[in-house]
Image (tube, rainbow, N blue to C red):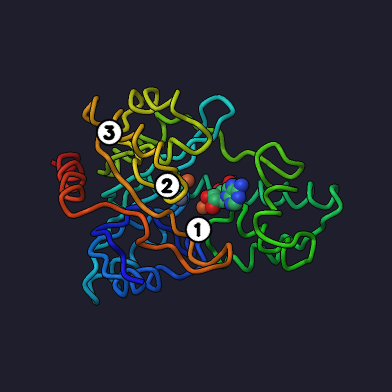
Amino acid sequence: MRSPHYADLHCHSTASDGSDAPAVVVRRARERGLHVIALTDHDTVAGVAEAQAEGARIGVRVIAGTELTCYVGKREVHVLGYGLDIGNAELAEHCARFQEARIRRAREIGEKLAAAGAPIDIDRVMADADGGVIGRPHVARALVEAGHVKDFDEAFEKFLGDGKPAAVSKMEIDPRACVDVIRKAGGIAVMAHPALGNQYDIVSELIAAGCVGVEVWHSAYDATATERLGAMALDHGWVRTGGSDCHGSIKGGEPILGQVGIGKAQWEKVERAIGAARA
Ligand code: AMP
Ligand code: FE
Ligand code: FE
Ligand code: ZN
């Protein structure tokens, strides 16, 4: 199915918890008629070089992105970075530290699952992630395969979701530190999906930490969310971004790449913001 949008600025690959290799994501973008995508894997830029090489070959512009995890108190917040220098040493160091923390966390999740009566082979889960940043979706897939739950959603409802028996927080870093990593790598920071988990009350805190925009369009929003965030952004002059947050088919079903995104004129505004950060 063709995308009605020009750009999809939020998607994942096997570099984190998506089901498809970066080049496959880019080929799908091309098939769906997208002109621009940003690859925004969790806490890594490891898929960007492959995606950009494929994009150059087949004519899709690939923005070097990431989705960094941080915390406001105990609440997990995601910060998107766009227009990054993927060779930046501090960015690499941040991602490496996060990756180690995620491996420790995966082992802890494995222990909690065993205690909760749903043992899985966490070493195999990590091997299956194949070097990608390990996350709960990988564990959810293993829980389904082991027959402990009937599907991906039940894995989160019963075990992995926030507050459930096998939930473990990640590396607790504050928004400003994440934004600084993104800015030092030449990028712009945007607060990801504020409507998820009802994070409207901390949008201004994220802006104060250096985010220049908010994600106004997202596949998990209802119409109210987009209206509310769009109005906030226009009032304050924040950059408005949008994307599908496609994870391929890791949850089952057809990949939603390109189903949410932004038009050409809106993309050009984002592009100018990225350019201004680099100037
Ligand atoms: P992690 O980064 O390991 O904490 O895993 C977070 C990822 O799990 C998110 O990016 C989503 O892809 C997925 N996820 C989180 N919560 C849920 C949920 N309740 N149902 C389905 N998927 C979820
Ligand atoms: Fe994810
Ligand atoms: Fe996210
Ligand atoms: Zn995401």
Upstream in the sequence, badge 2 or badge 1? 1
Q: Residue at x 32, y 32 (%)?
A: 211
CA distance for labels 3 and 2? 15 Å
Which quadrant of the rendered structure holds the C terminus? top left
Check contact, mark 2 vs mark 1: CB within 8 A.
Answer: yes
In the image, taking residue 252 as reference, residue 116 lies left or right, namely right
In the image, taking residue 174 as reference, residue 242 lies left or right, namely left
Which quadrant of the rendered structure holds the N terminus? bottom left
The image's mark for residue 67 is 2
Callout 3: helix, strand or loop? loop
Q: Is residue 124 above or below residue 277?
A: below
Dividing the picture into quarters, in which one does residue 246 lie? bottom left
x and y percent of residue 62 in the render?
27, 61
Residue type at tag 1: Ser
Callout 2: helix, strand or loop? strand
Residue type at tag 3: Val
CA distance for labels 2 and 1? 10 Å
